[in-house]
Each structure stands twice: as structure tokens, then as C-alpha cells.
Amino acid sequence: MRGEIEQDQHTRVLQELSSMIINILRSPPLPISFPSLVGPAFSSISSRTSQASPAAFASLFLGISVALMLFGSVTFVIGLLMMPLVTGLVILFYFVGLLHNLSELGRTILWPGYTSNNKDLPGKDFQLECHQLEIFVKRNRLAEEH
């Protein structure tokens, strides 16, 4: 559930980024109007409408690709640094499981009737009911014979 929420957030962010890029590419830039109080030097700039050059679009996409590469490389480095920790935890859990199984095996060999978790055995109740049923049937047979 949490992974789906994070994936939906990532998908939504990528869709918003894509729509912003498409809107930038489709719409012509708005003319910039400066107040006339600034001076006559800026009045000629405000009268011109500038179109985005191909170099500007190339710079935009270059910036986007560099940002994505940086985020990807940071993610890779974090994963690379965490790999020994994850591997160590997996080995630790396997080792603990192996010790647990060996101790259970040793207990079974040394004390055959002993089980550490008798109440957790599957089918214990069924075995108990079958045993009680056998006793009941034997008593009925003995009663009928006498």
C-alpha cells in the first residue's frame, strides 16, 4: 500500500514535469513589460518580444537530463552504500535460523519426547480428539463384552 502511494506520487510529479515542459515548448514567451519609470534604456527592450532560441531549448533539456542523472547517481550511491548492511542482515538472519534449527534437531535427538512448543504443533487438537475417540470406542467394546 505504501509503495503504491509513493509510486503514485512519483508518477504525478513526472506527469506535472512533462506537462510543464510541453507547455513551455508550445506557448510563445510573453513579452516582458518594464515600468516606464525605469528609464528610456529599458523601453526598447520592453517593446521587443523575444522568441526562445533553439539553444534555450537545448539548455532546458540539458538541465533536465543533468538533474535526472544527478538524482539517479545519488540514488545509486545510497543503494551501493546500503548493500553491505542489507547483505549482513540477510546473513545474520540465516545464521540465527540455522542455529535455531540445529538446537531443535539436537533437542529432538537428545530428548525424543520433548518438544519446546507442544501447543503450537499443527493437528494436536485433532490427535487428542482421535485418542479420546479411541478410548471411548474401547470402553464401549469392553462394556458390550461384559
Image (tube, rainbow, N blue to C red):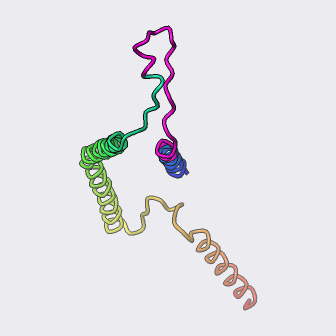
Question: 23 or 83, which is in the foreground?
Answer: 23
Q: Does the image show residue 75?
A: no
Percent x, y of residue 12: 53, 46
Q: Is residue 29 above or below residue 92?
A: above
Left-right relation of 125 to 109: right
Percent x, y of residue 70: 29, 42
Q: Is residue 35 magenta?
A: yes
Q: Residue at x 26, y 49 (%)?
A: 83
Q: Which residues are magenta?
A: 19-44
Q: Is residue 24 magenta?
A: yes
Q: Is residue 117 above or below residue 20?
A: below
Question: 54 or 76, which is in the foreground?
Answer: 54
Q: Residue at x 55, y 51 (%)?
A: 1
Query: How many labels were placed on the picture?
Result: 0
Percent x, y of residue 56: 35, 39
Q: In which quarter of the view is residue 142 placed?
A: bottom right
Q: Residue at x 75, y 89 (%)?
A: 144
State which quarter of the image contains the C terminus: bottom right
